[in-house]
Image: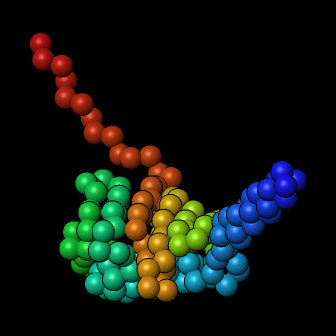
């Protein structure tokens, strides 16, 4: 009797561990990675075109955007306001931003992240800036959406000359 109980308990443990292992790896396929990567491709296309509304539509309603030199934009309205201004200014400056196709992507269930580098070039092809970004996605209603986004430049921030000390 005791051996039967042990055998049943062992079987239950093995079934649970197998289910957990399958759950942990769900979604981390090349096709899902391409789906995540496609969100950033759409982001760059819209941003370079100056379409801030299309960029903002890639974020969830509760997303947080942490852009350099700006306070965090929390929620759809703040992110939309940020990109309506920022994307239009970027496109008007005749610059183009592109990501590095060799980015790293990880997926676990309905959460994904993408780390990548980017380059900003002028219309002649001269590199004006390089940097890196980290974007976190959630799959909502079958669609990957941005929930957290941040990036930073490889160029050191400009320093301001300090005022002479008072005499």
Looking at the rendered image, the quarter that the C terminus falls into is top left
Q: Residue furthest front?
A: 1
* Residue 35, above or below 102: below
> Residue at left 83%, top 51%?
2
- In the rendered image, residue 17, in percent from the top left (x then y), is placed at 73, 61
- Tell me if 28 is positioned left or right of 139 in this view: right
> Residue at left 19%, top 24%?
164
- In the rendered image, residue 161, in percent from the top left (x then y), is placed at 27, 35
Q: Residue furthest left?
A: 167
- In the rendered image, residue 117, in percent from the top left (x then y), is placed at 57, 63
Location of residue 12 by image quarter: bottom right
> Residue at left 30%, top 53%?
69
* Residue 144, above or below 111: below
- In the rendered image, residue 128, in percent from the top left (x then y), is placed at 47, 64
Looking at the rendered image, the quarter that the N terminus falls into is bottom right
Residue 14 appears in the rendering: no
Q: Residue furthest top?
A: 167
Location of residue 24 by image quarter: bottom right
- Tell me if 3 is positioned left or right of 133 in this view: right
Q: Nearer the viewer, residue 3 or 154?
A: 3
Q: Residue furthest right?
A: 3
């Amino acid at each position: 009797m005791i051996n039967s109980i042990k055998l049943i308990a062992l079987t239950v443990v093995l079934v649970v561990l197998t289910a957990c292992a399958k759950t942990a790896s769900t979604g981390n396929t090349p096709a899902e990675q391409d789906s995540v990567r496609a969100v950033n491709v759409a982001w760059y296309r819209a941003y370079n075109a100056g379409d801030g509304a299309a960029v903002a539509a890639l974020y969830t309603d509760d997303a947080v955007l942490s852009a350099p030199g700006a306070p965090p934009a929390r929620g759809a309205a703040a992110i939309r306001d940020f990109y309506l201004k920022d994307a239009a200014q970027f496109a008007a400056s005749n610059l183009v931003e592109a990501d590095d196709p060799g980015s790293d992507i990880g997926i676990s269930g309905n959460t994904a992240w993408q780390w990548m580098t980017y380059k900003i070039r002028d219309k002649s092809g001269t590199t004006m800036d390089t940097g890196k970004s980290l974007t976190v996605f959630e799959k909502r209603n079958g669609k990957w959406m941005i929930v957290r986004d941040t990036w930073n430049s490889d160029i050191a921030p400009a320093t301001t000359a300090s005022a002479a000390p008072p005499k």
